[in-house]
Image (cartoon, rainbow, N blue to C red):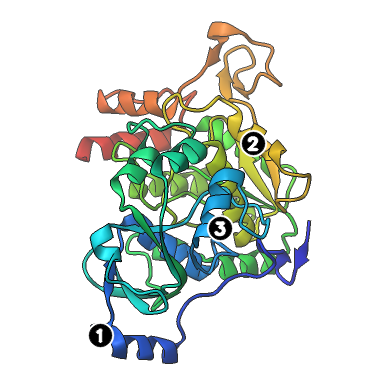
Amino acid sequence: MTQHADGIAPHGGKLIDRLATEAESKEFLEKADSLPRVQLDQRALSDLVMIAIGGFSPLTGFMEQADYETVVTDMRLENGTPWSVPVTLSVSEDIAEPLKEGEWVRLDDESGRFVGVLELTQKYRYNKNHEATNVYRTDEEKHPGVAVIYQQGAINLAGPVWLLERDAHPLFPTYQIDPAASRAQFRDRGWKTVVGFQTRNPIHRAHEYIIKCALETVDGLFLHPLVGATKSDDIPADVRMRCYEIMMENYFPKERVILAINPSAMRYAGPREAIFHALIRKNYGCTHFIVGRDHAGVGDYYGTYDAQKIFEEFEPGELGITPMKFEHAFYCKRTEGMATSKTSPSTGEERIHLSGTKVRALLRSGEMPPPEFSRPLVAAELARAMKTS
C-alpha cells in the first residue's frame, strides 16, 4: 500500500485539484457571455465537484473515448489504472453539434448559474446498451442507473474541467470535508489506518455492528454518507444525516470517528460501484473500506455478495485500499445481540433480518422499527420525518 505525505497515496499517485485560482476564475468570468453553454444536471454537477476536489483522482475532467471504452469493458483507464464506472458528460446532438473541439465551454448548473469550464478535447458517440450491460449487468430500463443512460444525450463531451468556486453545502456545510482536508485531519489525529463507510440509507443496528467490528482493527472511522442524487424513494439526505448525528452523540467514540458528507451521486451499479466507492475513499485518505451485503445494489440485479467478489478481479494490492468484507448482520435472539452467520449459533426465526426497504414500508404505515433493528432514538427520528414528509 503506497504511502503519501498525508498517509495512503491518492489513486494514481496525486490528489487532483481543479478548483480555479482567483486569477483563472476572473478570466473565465470575463469570457462568460461569449462562451457556448452546457447545462449540468444534478449528477453531472456533483461529478464536476468530485473531479475538482480530487475525489475522482486521477480524473481531471470528463472521460475521453479511449478511457470511456476501457472502463466500460475492462474496468480500467486506457493506461491500465483500475477504474470501474464511467464519468461522462452526455448531451443531445443538438447541443453537441455547434460545439468545436479545442474551445472552452461554459458549464452552468440547473438554475443557469456559471459554475465551471470544460476545455472540449473530444465529442463522441457511445453505445448506451453496451454501457448498461457492462456497468450495470442489465439493459432493463427499470434499473435506475440504466434509466439514466437511456434518458441522457447521445454524445459525450470530454476534456479537462475547472470548478469556479467551491460552494459550501446548502444543508451540511460543517460536514463538508474535502479530500485534502480529510487527509489533514487523519494526519493530525495520528491515524495511520482509517476505514471508510458508505451508505445511502439511514444507519441501523446491522450497520453499527459491522462498523464497530471494523473499528476494532483500525485507528479511525470515516463515516461518509452519500448526499448526492439518489432515487426518489430513498430516505432524504437531511433525515439520514440527523440519524448519523444521533449515533455520533450516543453510540460511537467521538474521538475515533469523523462524520463527513460524500457529495457524489448514486449510480446503483452494485459490484462496479463498490470498487468506485472504495477508490473515492482512498482519495479521501482511507486505507480500508467496508463492503457489506449487496453494496450499492438495487432490486434483485446483483447477488448478495457480488460486490465483495468483484475485488478478486484485481491483483492483491492493485487497488491500493483494503476491502473489509462483512456478511449480512442480524439480531440474534439466542445470544441477544447483533451477529452474522460467522458468529451466531442461531438459525431461522431466531434471526431478525430487516432491510432498508422493509423499514421504509413500516415507517410509511406508521409503525416504528423494532429496537433489534434500529436504535430507538434513530427510529423516533425516522418516524418523525416520515410523518412530516
Would residue 266 be visible to someone looking at this image? yes
From this view, report whether residue 213 is shown above or below residue 280. above
Q: Which residue is mark 2?
A: 310
Q: Is residue 220 left or right of residue 104?
A: right
Q: Which residue is mark 1?
A: 34
Q: Secondary structure at mark 2?
A: helix
How far, Cα to Cα, is label 2 from label 1? 47 Å
Residue drawn at x 27%, y 73% is: 37
> Local crowd at mark 2 within 10 Å, few (<14), some, or many (≥20)?
some
Query: Which of pointers 2 and 1 lies earlier in the amino acid sequence?
Result: 1
Q: Quadrant of residue 66?
A: bottom right
Q: Secondary structure at mark 3?
A: helix
From this view, report whether residue 340 is shown above or below residue 15. above
How far, Cα to Cα, is label 3 from label 1? 30 Å
Q: Amino acid at mark 3?
A: Asp
How far, Cα to Cα, is label 2 from label 3? 20 Å
Q: Is residue 296 left or right of residue 153?
A: right
Q: Amino acid at mark 1?
A: Ser
Number of the label disc, if any, that sits on residue 67: 3
Q: Position of residue 367 (x, y in %)?
A: 30, 23
> Local crowd at mark 1 within 10 Å, few (<14), some, or many (≥20)?
few
Residue drawn at x 43%, y 57% is: 88
Q: Position of residue 278 (x, y in %)?
A: 61, 49
Q: Position of residue 290 (x, y in %)?
A: 63, 41
Q: Is residue 168 left or right of residue 307?
A: left
Residue drawn at x 30%, y 91% is: 30
Q: Amino acid at mark 2?
A: Ile
Q: Position of residue 148 (x, y in %)?
A: 34, 44
Q: Is residue 84 left or right of residue 159?
A: right
From this view, report whether residue 162 is shown above or below residue 23. above
